[in-house]
Image (spheres, rainbow, N blue to C red):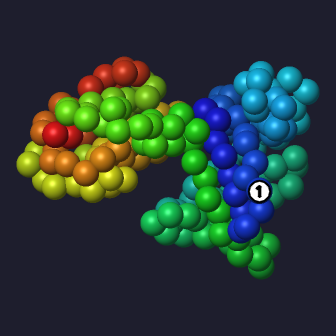
């Protein structure tokens, strides 16, 4: 997955994030590599992580231990690290593009599908419920990471096609928005 991260008012930076066993590998993409999508020559950081409690992460980065506290706000994260506080905006580039595509992409029935194989961790809505653009619909856990899938437009939840705890394949239909 490629994410774009902006800390405070700095220019957003792009990173490719992938799981490698129990570690997360972050490839730091520079502008030319990100545009080409190949990431050649980019620096990689391997991160071993644990979450002892919700919102608290213990990270081992390049043999240095860090304790990070994260608070989720509606449009950003507040990250506390080493007596400093950072306002962080992070976006999955593919998900961002899907949500911000033109109006033709959201006309009619919208299908919420699993981006990758995983397990349905939580269902956040009920059939018939009114939702706004950006509201969470379902949470899919994959590779020990939770992905909240959001509504790309205002509408009404048509159907929920899965149950909590159910294993799903990538591309599986999870819910519809009318």
Label 1: element kind: loop
Tally of numbered tags: 1
**Residue drawn at x 61%, y 33% as measured from the top left:** 1
**Residue drawn at x 76%, y 32% as measured from the top left:** 34
The answer to whether residue 44 of the structure is visible from this angle is no
Q: Where is residue 50 in the image (x, y as percent from the top left)?
A: 63, 51
**Residue drawn at x 40%, y 21% as measured from the top left:** 170
Q: Nearer the viewer, residue 70 or 155?
A: 155
Relative side of 103 to 147, left or right: left
Relative side of 40 to 135, left or right: right
Q: Position of residue 24 (x, y in %)?
A: 69, 38
Q: Quadrant of the C terminus?
A: top left
Q: Nearer the viewer, residue 81 or 104?
A: 104
**Placement of 35 over or under 4, stated as above or below:** above
The answer to which quarter of the image holds residue 25 is: top right
Residue pointed to by mark 1: 11
Q: Which of 138 and 53 is in front in this view?
A: 138
């Amino acid at each position: 997955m490629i994410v774009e991260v902006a800390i405070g008012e700095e220019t957003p930076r792009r990173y490719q994030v992938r799981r490698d066993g129990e570690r997360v590998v972050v490839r730091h993409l520079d502008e030319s590599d990100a545009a080409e999508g190949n990431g050649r020559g980019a620096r990689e950081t391997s991160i071993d992580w644990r979450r002892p409690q919700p919102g608290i992460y213990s990270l081992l980065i390049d043999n240095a231990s860090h304790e990070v506290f994260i608070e989720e706000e509606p449009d950003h994260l507040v990250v506390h690290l080493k007596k400093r506080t950072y306002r962080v905006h992070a976006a999955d580039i593919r998900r961002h593009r899907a949500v911000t595509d033109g109006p033709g992409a959201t006309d009619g029935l919208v299908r919420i599908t699993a981006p990758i194989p995983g397990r349905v961790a939580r269902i956040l809505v009920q059939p018939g419920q009114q939702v706004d653009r950006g509201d969470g619909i379902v949470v899919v856990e994959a590779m020990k990471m939770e992905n909240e899938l959001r509504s790309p437009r205002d509408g009404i939840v048509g159907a929920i096609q899965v149950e909590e705890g159910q294993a799903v394949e990538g591309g599986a239909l999870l819910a519809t928005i009318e």
